[in-house]
Amino acid sequence: MKKVILSAIVLMVSAFAFAQTRTAPVKVEGGMIEGVVIDGVNTYFGIPFAAPPVGELRWKKPQPVQPWQGVRFCDRFAPAPMQNMNARRPKVWKNVAEMNPTTSEDCLYLNVFAPAKKSDKPYPVMVWIYGGGFHQGGTDGPVYRGNKYAKEGVIMVSIAYRLGVFGYLAHPELSKESGHGSGNYALYDQIAGLKWVKENIAAFGGDPNNVTVFGQSAGSRSIQGLLCAKGTEGLFQRAIPQSGCAIREDAKCLPLNENEALGKAFFESIGITSLEAMRAIDAVTLQQLYQNSTFTPKFRPAIDGSLIVEDFNDATLGGRYLDIDYMIGYTKDDVPKANFPKAVGRWADNQVVNLNRRPIYVYSFDHPQPEDPNNPTKDSFGAQGAVHSAELPYMFGQVELSTKPMKKEDYELAERMVKYWTNFAKYGNPNGLAAGDWKPYTKDDQYVHHLDVKQ
């Protein structure tokens, strides 16, 4: 009973936080919506971009949005995808009450942060893909707010995708049913979200032909999948993969037959052998069985024989990925095992040296967040300093939401990084139209821009 009351209080706080002036109605796929105006930004939470992937639609490609009647009021985040709830309790952010305290298999929703001011020229668009090891995460992460980008004249969209056993399961029965392999439902969700942006973002004042996709960790690795996937050309024109997209020997894609065997072994371990029974088990029970099994966190992007037909490394080395504008990077003390300076360097060298493609922009985020005595930094990868994910509150411009003792220089670094990210979305250059200090990474100059506070 206490948990129910607490959830109700959290929802009430969330609703109160978003109790602002309503936007004008907007027509999108499925029907009419209204959002809320928050600090001069038109904000829309929980817009459905596909049908709920439940029942017979579990482990299928996302299907078209189900239409609704009247005007849908999009004033709060939708439930996050199914995941281990114990990991969705961040302690170092002031705005956790804005998060949706629930998870659901019905999770294919997105959010839009758009300038309230009308423009004669369509706004560039940035589409955020969250990280979380392919098993955690959601669009309501405390720092994943697009208000600072909107104030710089960019529309930000954050899209949800299925996780874990719901998003990446491959199985012989699923391959038989589809006729073309199985797995990678999460990547199909991301593509569906990008297609929604292509078809609907103009209604918010956005330019469907100037879209930057950006993501961190598993979101960045997802971007590498989208770059190598079939049928994604034209959905986005620029990419900012952070701490994930690289040429890494420790992160190869499983072949379809091995991935199918993994899924088959998992369900056999819980006594389920038929596809009908696989879909009949309720989502909460399935999530619990999966996270308590020896198979977590093994389900992730893999070769499905249809969308992804080869390992990301092979596709990247062979130039079989999108030739678009790139800004790519990592944190100075990022996941030690991944060795991102070397792995991203290999990716960049391949791009500009072996493939002789356009120059790119590479960064290293070098600034450790200030320590909060009550919540000291604990990095699960065994690193200290500018650890994995340390750049997120800065490049979203959300350092004021941290409980850590942020200083003037932290705010200044965040302001610079918001400019870099939005300039890249606008022009394909983090410096913008003027000359700047961030040089491109080229065949003749392997320049890496170091992001840190100014002493």
Image: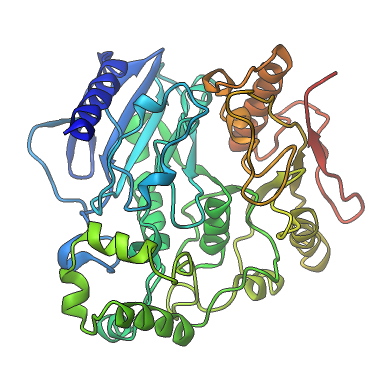
Q: Quadrant of residue 311?
A: bottom right
Q: Is residue 189 above or below residue 39?
A: below
**Position in image of residue 100 (x %, y %):** 31, 35
Q: Is residue 292 above or below residue 278?
A: above
The colour scheme used to paint the residues is rainbow
Q: Quadrant of residue 51?
A: bottom left
Q: Is residue 289 above or below residue 23?
A: below
Residue 19 seen in the current view: yes
Q: How many marks?
A: 0
Q: Nearer the viewer, residue 371 or 70?
A: 371
Q: Nearer the viewer, residue 417 or 65?
A: 417
**Position in image of residue 363 (x %, y %):** 76, 42
Q: Quadrant of residue 275?
A: bottom left
Residue 26 seen in the current view: no
**Residue drawn at point x = 63 percent, y = 68 percent:** 251
Quadrant in the picture for the N terminus: top left
Quadrant in the picture for the C terminus: top right
Which residue is farthest right?
444
In the image, 285: left or right of 137?
A: left
**Residue drawn at point x = 48 percent, y = 46 percent:** 130
In the image, 374: left or right of 79?
A: right
**Position in image of residue 156 (x %, y %):** 46, 34
In the image, 315: left or right of 265?
A: right
Q: Nearer the viewer, residue 354 or 329?
A: 329
Q: Is residue 186 above or below residue 182?
A: above
**Residue drawn at point x = 87 percent, y = 50 percent:** 446
Q: Nearer the viewer, residue 163 or 284?
A: 284
**Position in image of residue 287 (x %, y %):** 31, 60
**Residue drawn at point x = 78 percent, y = 65 percent:** 350
